[in-house]
Amino acid sequence: MTPEEKIVSKLSKTDNRTRETVDKVKREVCKEYGIDCPPNIKLIEAYRDMKLNDKELEALLRIRPVRSLSGVVNISILTKPFECPGECIYCPSQEGSPKSYLDNEPAVMRARLNDYDPKRQIENRLESLHMTGHPTDKIELRIVGETWSHYKKEYREEFIKDSFDALNQKESKTLKEAQAINERAKHKMVCLSIETRPDFIDKKEIEHLRKLGVTMVELGVQSIYDDVLIKNKRGHTVKSTVLATKLLKDAGFKVCYQIMPNLPGSTIEKDLAMLEIIFSDERFKPDFFKLYPCMVLKEAPLYEDYLKGKYLPYTEKEIENIIIQAKKEIFPYWVRVQRVIRDIPSQSVIAGGGSSNLRELIEKKADKEGWSCKCIRCREVGKDYDPKEKIKLFEEKYRSSGGTEIVLTFENEQRTKLFSLLRLRIPSDPYPEVLENTSIIREIHTYGEQLQIKKNKIMEKSPQHKGLGKKLIREAEKRAPTDTISVISGVGARGYWKKNGYFLKDSYMLKNI
């Protein structure tokens, strides 16, 4: 028996297992063998070689468990570098990398090693996730790069088809065939996200995004002030953001804003006012949010202005204070703040940045000072699930982009732990036509540790597969003022909706209620 196998064997017979227990057993066995402690990836390999069926132990050995604590696993892949239509002064440009991305960013390095081939990028990420113990039944695929909607349609369709083929582990002749296969595949694509500019969103683009299976759109909004957008040569106005937000929501898409405080032409007071407006003015109100404070990079035109003293960026402390005030007073219960700073390697940042673990530092400060952020990400149950804890139904109702949003959630009574969420929209001007006279479910998500489908022997550790999503669907159906309800389902989630009485029509799932 190898040292790794002995460690796994001892752990499999141990009660009340924790990560501290794993470390203790590792030290005991390694002292016995006179060797250094092996990494967990070696223990996972031994676990699989021994053909054990102990999902609790497998989860305990998992490397970076946070990757699957939101109920899905995210895979990000990059598109090829193309000529970008933008001239933004803050945006870096490097030969061989998509504009706005640097060649020393981990995702870019992986993409370059795979020649930006989507299939190879996904296959490598799946292998890595498997080796580190993460289930890959439910995949949230995020496509990043330059302006997605600027690429030729042929390239976009081939890119998505290849992505489905990689998850399906099977070649298909057409995109439609690849999507059909994914409904029953081992690795189901439950969410497909792209990033683009607001001024590229119109009804034709909406139709094409649905043909591809896209369910979420990240908009490079950056600012809601026209004078700031003009000064930074963004190339679009706030009017474009307002229109794109409305079109996307009325078509059922989840909408994420990328916002940049610290831009030339703005101030701390102006940026804080911008954040308040975004979450109070019904023209905006994104479902997801990324805060990317402007950074000075040598590869961007803004660098010259910085050297000449024409641009003075905020200090790290000032950036931290903006984020703290937003988390304490601005972010509502219905938004998921995915990032508060962009993860650019510190050696590439000349000024205007902050620690890459700034979010973690702020969370520690919040705990010490006794306050908390209300956003979805900060309240996701994660590993803190207690099956004995009482779960309560909450409803948030608000006006947004001319329509009405109803956000239904299952949470604990204190609203500090979020278990499951559903977004229902009563649109003002639905498009495509299939959505006429329907209410739209734009998102349904149960949080907590991702469990492999049909292999849920550690159900007591997670709220997944307990019927919370199904209960939220029934609550949404009760509240829908229309005779038909529609869902912008991820391709890999269509089977779930079929089990709940929905049928496929023009890329949406529908049900007569």
Image (cartoon, rainbow, N blue to C red):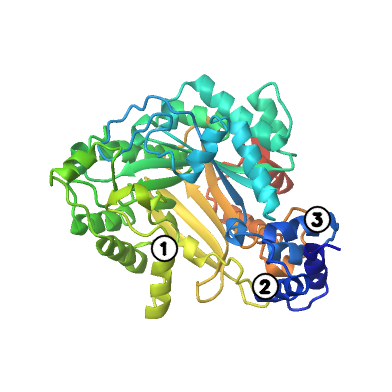
Q: Which residue is mark 1?
A: 359
Q: Which tag, 1 or 2, sits closer to the chain's start?
A: 2
Q: Which residue is under mark 2?
A: 23
Q: Amino acid at mark 2?
A: Asp
Specify whether 414 is left or right of 174.
left
Q: Is residue 260 visible?
A: no
Q: How far apart are labels 1 and 2 at the CA level?
A: 27 Å
Percent position of residue 512, x then y: 64, 43
Distance, label 3 to label 1, CA atoms, is: 35 Å
- Label 3 vs label 2: CA separation? 19 Å
Q: Secondary structure at mark 2?
A: helix
User: Is 79 placed above or below 295 here?
Assistant: above
Instruction: Name the kind of residue labelled 1 in the image.
Output: Arg
Q: Residues within 10 Å of mark 2 (few under 14, many from 20)?
A: few
Q: Is residue 117 above or below residue 447?
A: above
Residue 48: mark? 3
Disc nearer the start of the sequence (3/1): 3
Q: Earlier in the sequence, mark 3 or mark 2?
A: 2
Picture quadrant of residue 219: top left
Give how far across and how far down residue 398 sits, in percent: 40, 56
Q: Residue at x 37, y 62 (%)?
A: 331
Mark 1 neighbour density, 10 Å: few (under 14) some (14–19) many (20 or more): some
505 and 21: which is toward the camera: 21
Pinpoint residue 311: horizontal percent, then vertical percent: 16, 47
